[in-house]
Amino acid sequence: MDAALLASALAWLDDDPDPVTQAELHRLIDADDEAAVADRFDGRLQFGTAGLRGELGAGPMRMNRVTVIRAAAGLARYLLDTDPQAAERGVLIGYDARHNSDVFALDSARVLAGAGIRALLLPRPMPTPVLAWGITKVDATAGVMVTASHNPAADNGYKVYLGDGVQIVPPADSDIAACIDAVGPIAAVLMAPPESALIEYLDDAVVEAYLDHVPSVRHAAGTDAVQLAYTPLHGVGGRVAMEAFRRAGFASPAVVVEQFEPNPDFPGLPFPNPEEPGTMDALLALAASIEADVALANDPDADRMAAAIPLSDGTWRALNGDEIGWLLAEHLLARTTGDDRLVVTTVVSSTLLADMAAAAGVHHAEVFTGFKWIGHYVHDHPELRFVLGYEQALGYLVATTPLDKDGITAAVLMAEVAAVARAEGTTIEGRLEAIAERFGRHVTSQRSVKLAPSAMGGLMDALRAAPPAMLGGHDVTEVTDFPEANLLRYSCGPTVRVQVRPSGTEPKVKLYAELVDGDPEPYLDDLEQLLLAHGR
């Protein structure tokens, strides 16, 4: 094994307080598995606007106690430098049911307490929206959620919010990252004991207050007759969601029993992301068997919400994220008033929300990809009355708090959409048809194109230098560059929009297309071929 690599691994072992990851790394060293060791030591997980996220394991390229302790120490330094009241206000800490989430949460609390900052630890695994909502409730200086959301079972993550309850955006992310980079060996990081007076083990007050707030998202209270099917996909949303439905006035949904209890291994699921094929199969079977009006799912940390509906031909279909956004927008815009209303979506989501906002005479904003930008836009425009924010990746905000996506309140509102449709003698399918008749049939599609890592470098520069002249057999009439989001948009006339952006974490490129009354696939085919040619 390379001497420098071995030295790095041995130094890590000296710093690692976890016997599990110590044993993992010892096995790899003893087996002289240079490739596996190099994979764990080829850099360091980078802290960004999504915090940290990665596979569990030993080494700086994995999620482990060393990585988390360093992150917490850097966050503590940043908070003390930027908020004179940080120590007194404290940090609210939540965690999901993934492997090591509770360990990482307690380590974070001990590091923060060691730095003199109050650490307020939620009492058990909780949905991310409860943590996000609670930050402003307890007036914390920041919040930490230990979760990998809908990532594979082998992953975990570390999401950071500041005191406004919004996920961090630049420059806070780079400033926190700099503080993390300045942390030395973790043996020098002071960690308070678990029984420290600065670590407060909270009761259920925060989640109870969150649940008390849930009914406020309803706009047709009393219209409650609806048959629901639901699954939390082995995540932490189940019990909170069931109580949310009850407090909002709905009968308990039928649940996918085998997926109701949290399980960090997500048994039976090909991938714990409701967007992935096959993930909602059990839910759809349950919904069909009880003739449900709508089927609802949360992802494992319950910040996203998926929905499926019965069709007139007797089959079931999962809605895409834009379709859910349109349904929520139509429902809310019809039941709120005032020209100070605001709806927000992202650059890769459908353009239809802008048309709906114009027809209703309300404000519309389009922000960069990532729900944090929706939250920050709402936070920065208090003069406007927020109604709805959504991104096509199943993220929805239907209340003024938390300023982050919330799959539980979105599910409650989607239940109301179905209940109102049923009361009016129609269906959700009928609602979508009425939207298409009024605004044109917007058809959206997206795909991911995997490329060799070597092909990713310079890709966007090449596309900027030589944009395609035609896509889908039609001239590209306009190219719009969003350099801050590293996204390019190609317009082929007024009703065709095709977009491309590289993934920030993997060697792949994401493509998005939208047409009105047409098929977007030929446009994506042409753009994919262009990318593959570049990769060769």
Image (cartoon, rainbow, N blue to C red):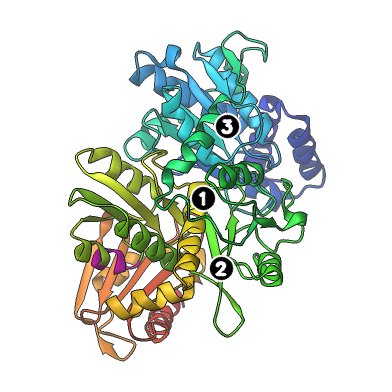
Q: Is residue 55 magenta?
A: no
Name the secondary structure under disc 3. strand
Q: Residues within 10 Å of mark 3 (few under 14, many from 20)?
A: many
Of the numbered discs 3 and 2, the one sitting upstream in the chain is: 3
Name the one closer to the observer, 149 or 256: 256
Q: Nearer the viewer, residue 231 or 349?
A: 231
> In what element is the residue under mark 1?
helix
- Residue that label 1 marks: 407
As drawn, the label of residue 296 is none
Amino acid residing under circle 2: Ala
Q: Residue most toward the bottom?
A: 473
Q: Which residue is painted at 71% across and 30% down in the image?
A: 13
235 lies left or right of 441: right
Residue 125 vertical position relative to residue 419 in the rendered view, above or below: above
Q: Quadrant of residue 110?
A: top right
Q: Nearer the viewer, residue 264 or 385?
A: 385
Residue 308: mark: 2
Q: Amino acid type of disc 3?
A: Gly
Q: Residue at x 54, y 47 (%)?
A: 249
Label 2 and label 1: CA atoms lie apart by 15 Å
Task: Give me the C-alpha separation between circle 3 and circle 2.
Answer: 30 Å
Horizontal relation, residue 28 to residue 65: left or right? right
Badge 3 is on which residue? 94
Check disc 2 and report its element: helix, strand or loop: strand
- Horizontal side of 249 relative to 494 (left or right) equals right
Regarding residue 44, the answer to whether it shows in the image is no
The label nearer to you, 3 versus 2, is 2
What residue range appears in magenta? 350-355
Residue 119, given in percent of the width and then of the height, sits at 54, 19
Position of residue 273 relative to residue 94, above or below, is below
Tell me how far mark 1 sits from mark 3, CA to CA. Answer: 16 Å
